[in-house]
Amino acid sequence: MTKQPDQNTISVEDMYHDKENKINMELSTHLDTNIKNVDILFKDCMDLVKREVDIGKEVPFRVYGVYFDGMVNREILENFFLSRIIDYKNLNGDIFENSKTPTQIIMQHFSATFDVKEVDTMDDMIAAILSGDSGIFVDNSEKGIVIATRGWPNRGVGEPSSENVVRGSRDGFTEIVRFNSVLIRRRIRDTKLKTKMISFGTRSRTDVAVMFIEDIARPELVEDVMERLNKYEVDAIFDSGYIEQLIEDSWKSPFPQTQATERPDKVASGLLEGKVAIIVDNSPFVLIVPTTLNALYQASEDYYQRWQIMSLTRILRYLVSFLSFALPGLYIATLNFQPGMLPTPFAISIAAAREGITFPTVLEILIMEVTFELFREAGIRIPGAIGHVIGLVGGIVIGQAVVEARIISPMIVIIVAFTAISTFAIPDYSLTASFRLIRFFFIGASAIFGLYGFLLAMLFVLAHLSSLESFKIPYLAPYNASDRNGFKDLKDTVLRFPTFMQGTRPIFARENQRIRLRLKKDRAGEDMEPGPKKTSNNKHVNRRNK
Amino acid sequence: MGKFKGLLLLILPLMLTGCWDSVELNERHVILEIAIDKTPKPDLSKPINERQIYQITYGIPDIGKLSGKDSLAENVKTSLTTQSPSIATSIDEIETKTQNTVTFSHTKALILGEEMLKDKDAFQAAIDALLRDMRIGRSVIVLATKGLAGDLTQADNPQNPIMGMYIMKYFNNKERPVSYAKGQLLANLIKELEDTGVSTMPMIMSDKEGIIQISGAALIKDYAFVTWLDKNEVRGQLLVEGKIKHVPIVVTYKDHYLTYMIKDQKSKIHFKENNGKLEANIDLTVKGDIIEYLSSNNKNIFNEESITEITQQLKQEIIRQTNLVIDKSQSLGVDFLGIGLEMYRKDPKQWKNYKDTWNEGDYKDFPIHVDTTVNIQNTGILE
Amino acid sequence: MFSHNGKVSVRQVEILLILQMFNTSILLLPRIAANHAGRNGYMLPIVALAFGIIYLFSITTLTNRFKGDTLVEFAPKIIGKPIAYCVLALFAIKIMITTGLEIRMFGEMVSQVMLPKTPIEVIILIMLLTTAYLVKSGIEATARMAEILLYFIFIPLVIVLTFIIVKADYKQLMPFFETDIVSVGKGAFVVSLSFMPIEFMLLLAGLMKKQEKTKQAIVIALITIAIIETIIIISTYAGIGVNESKRQIWPVLTLMQSIQFPGSLIENQEILMMTSWVFSIYMYISAGLYFTSLIGSRTFKFKRENVFILPIIPIIYFIAILPKSLVEAYKYYVGFQYHFGIWFLVPIPLVLIFIAKMRKVGHVNG
């Protein structure tokens, strides 16, 4: 039921906030007005701490500090600011020079921290307060002071929960934007690593940081990202998932068009390939755009271990992910439509196992798939150790019981269990979700039309993937447009070629920034900067350098 | 959204019933062998499309018993016989007698009775019917049998009651020596009959206890039966075609038998003019070991002189075995050794002279010489 | 970078052409070759290359005069609007008919091998709908799909052909060089009709990024297809014999049936080979659908290219279900290709070039 506001009384919210939820009050020079405004705005906000301090000795000089309880690091505020003010009161001295504004005086003399700034508008002031900084209103001044005192409760840097490695770093992103960008900046110590900040969401004012390497990433890409981020006006966002779904190219597709990761090394290597990272406050998952299907199959550990075993692992991943959505469909297609395809002893034993089973094969598979999805969902929500046990017990015991009761034939249990586990071979979690969905599509197509239906379903999915794009990069690159980069992109797809062969950047990067690895002696004697090889037609280079 | 739900509801029952072609695997009877005979006393007064000339026996295995599980059927195999004017009507009739629908996609063996082979039209029609519809695969093994094929398949074989599986395992085994029988696939049969008009298929028979023996062959010319070849003649045929593998040859040497095992054999046919007449020369190359001999102090075989003598003996024996089949085929006037085909391939101009009369008389008198090279590689671990 | 300008790269054109030429004609090829040239049929594709070069020159000379334009744009420039639109309509109708017949033949084959009891209309319809889904995304998506399908089509084929080649009976090919030149010539001409998809270049050349490389793209495609056809004919002869090739309607299918993989992992793997077939037919149908809709949309100067796709589907569907049996369909298919296949390959382009030269239209940079 929506409450219609009376015509006579307009709420506080409507009066002082404009359409974008920004405060349109003014920062007045009278402190009392400011105090009153703050009270109006933050009516019923009991967690706001307000205090007026008079720091003048002879002449009253009042300041008014406002902050949210629990969100500030009180040590900075009190030790490095307030105490100095109080100390001053007990000292002597004339600091009131006329050439400086009151805010400048305070900033110069009373703050023992570098991170203070002046703000002009009430909106900025309030926004800062809402973000955990402390706002200081100064009497007789048209500006206010904001001290960076953020110190809210956080989890600290821990291991990424979804992407584990045996070899490789174990720090993962947390919910704080600044920590996340720090983790990235530690890995790329280059001045050209840029961080742009946006505030997303009218009510949540979430900080979103866009990081990219300026001379590697294409400027069109960066522009495109910024444009898309500014396209929507949302209430609030709580996770990078919201942003992902708002900025992607095709909302109808079940495939993820951005890569969400908890690992800083993945983000760093993506940035060095020319991609753009989007860090969202309150979300430990950082988005990397653009992405391709191949990128979703790459795990960080692939590069830290040796190439032979990792090539084998990659092949296994592709094979297993294909089986994860194709196997039930293939089973139905061969069994019901083309039994001639199976070797005779195998066909006989499967047929024997199916004697007396009541349901048709399709229904069996659907029942088992639904059951396994049920286990999966339930397993997520059951806490801790019990959750793992229930998953295991559920699978084995119920599978066994169901076979004994002649509801399902044992082959189906094997197939469904295999597909359920094989989805975990894929490094990216959203991709496994897409495969789970496609699996049902394949089951349906195979059930109606057999192998022909299966093949058409594959063509359908391939057609969909071929037309899918992620920020103007075809989703199936580098299998697709491999001649763009002289087939060199293919060195890191199904097989991972040895490290010294991975000398070129993929197509995401700019055209003149394609070399990333070469022997030092190959460059000896040439007076070049590290990075791009000077090409004969420098037209691109000149245009970029403008 | 409403349209989508409607579409989903429409698709769901389609999915579950599988529309047109979906048949659950346990609702199919997998026929493993087909035995085709000519009905012993057909009623010839009826018109052709009602004349029941085909007597076909289907062996229907019970899947449950076959895999060792409990099942309601009594035996592991049930044989059903039908008499019908054509293969398709036979299948039609069978469907009235079986619990599940029959499928031929796993048929392994096709056994043809003697009378069926002798009736040229029926034989050719049967083969055509089986292939045209693509019901059975082209890699089915064809066999011929004396008497009625139906009796053969219904006999109780103690090793494996399902004849089809027995035959499949028999011929799939690569370790098996190729000695007295030459396996023939349906596709090959057709190919050879189309190419030259002459082909063979292995013969299968069973004795009173039900033990099955596969040896010898049936000779077919232009889709009509000519005669049975016994196992020695097939041995000769295999020698000429170079397909012998792991076969023992026994000769007498110094009052004892000596066995030589052929490991590998090749054969080459070429043609030469000799006194104005063309003649064929078959060169056999044989490699193997001596595996049996009784050697003692004064008669061991580990010396060059013995080896040479033994080689001579073996040559004679092999040539004798080959000549057996050459004489037989020439006396019949049917070239099932492929000599004519070789001439066509190697020397097409000469073939033009012989082409028309090859089967009539030219082959009978065509001079064919056999020559052998025998390599004894070792004598085992005894000297 | 990957801008949506509707242009395709040289490699994508090569692959598109190869996949389009790899259609049902290849299945029928050993039969045609055996009927015309007997045991020496495997020479026919090589000789057919000569015809292919003629087609190549006639088409590229025309398209190179009008860089950046497809047939829809430069035909009016040469012969004036009314006649040009007639020519274009004829072209569109021809593509539709060939596509319809092709999908019918394909449906017959699927019906025989995979789904005997399913009505053939349904088989054809769902194939058409799936192709429509691809084509509505434009030529770039189609070209990208072709690049992916290349792997899927040729890898199973190569594996199977390896098995055949190792175990085959090469004596079937002897004696060599027995057939006379006239039959070889005629046979080569019929085989060269399998190069008919080159006529799509009349439209596709204008969509290429580097149009000067058109000749190279077509040559590579032609040579590849000729080699593949020769290998298939040799394998079919060696695998099932020349006489069987003459008798069977789908000799290559019979060939696939007669292979036995060692270890019997999969029996009856001709069904596995149907994957290669389904995928390559898919590309052909997509191309037919796309180009017809391209002609339509460019003639009426619509911005969106996929307006015409939906109306064309029923037309092609009805053409496909028109023949009442396989015999009729086969007759129409081979007959149509034989009589009308060559028109847009040689005569009409040559006429257009001639008129263009007379009227001095178009650039002559070559």
Image (cartoon, coloured by chain):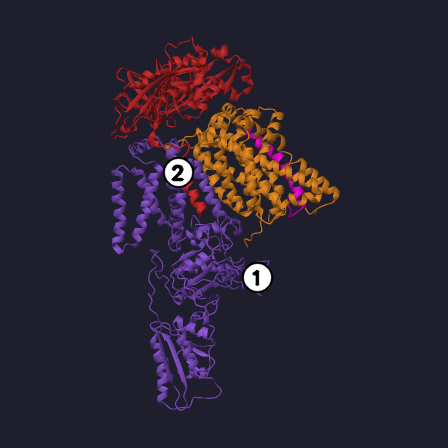
Chain colours: A purple, B red, C orange
Against C1, residue C143 (above or below) is above
Q: Is residue C88 visible?
A: yes
Kindly check if marks 1 and 2 are in contact, taking CB atoms under 8 A apart as contact: no
Question: The magenta stretch spans which residues?
Answer: C41-70
Percent coordinates x, y for residue A14 in the rendering = 45, 69
Front residue of this view, candidates B178 and A542: A542
Above or below, comparing residue A487 to residue A86 in the picture: above
Q: In the image, what residue type sits under mark 1?
A: Val
Q: Is residue A147 something one can see in this rendering?
A: no
Q: Quadrant of the N terminus of chain A?
A: bottom left
- In the picture of the structure, the residue carrying the numbered disc 1 is A541
Q: Is residue A537 above or below residue B46?
A: below
Position in image of residue B72 (x %, y %): 25, 27
- Give residue B146's quadrant in the image: top left
Give the left or right position of residue C108, taking residue B255 as reference: right
Instruction: Verify whether residue C7 appears in magenta.
Output: no
Quarter where residue C35 is shown: top right
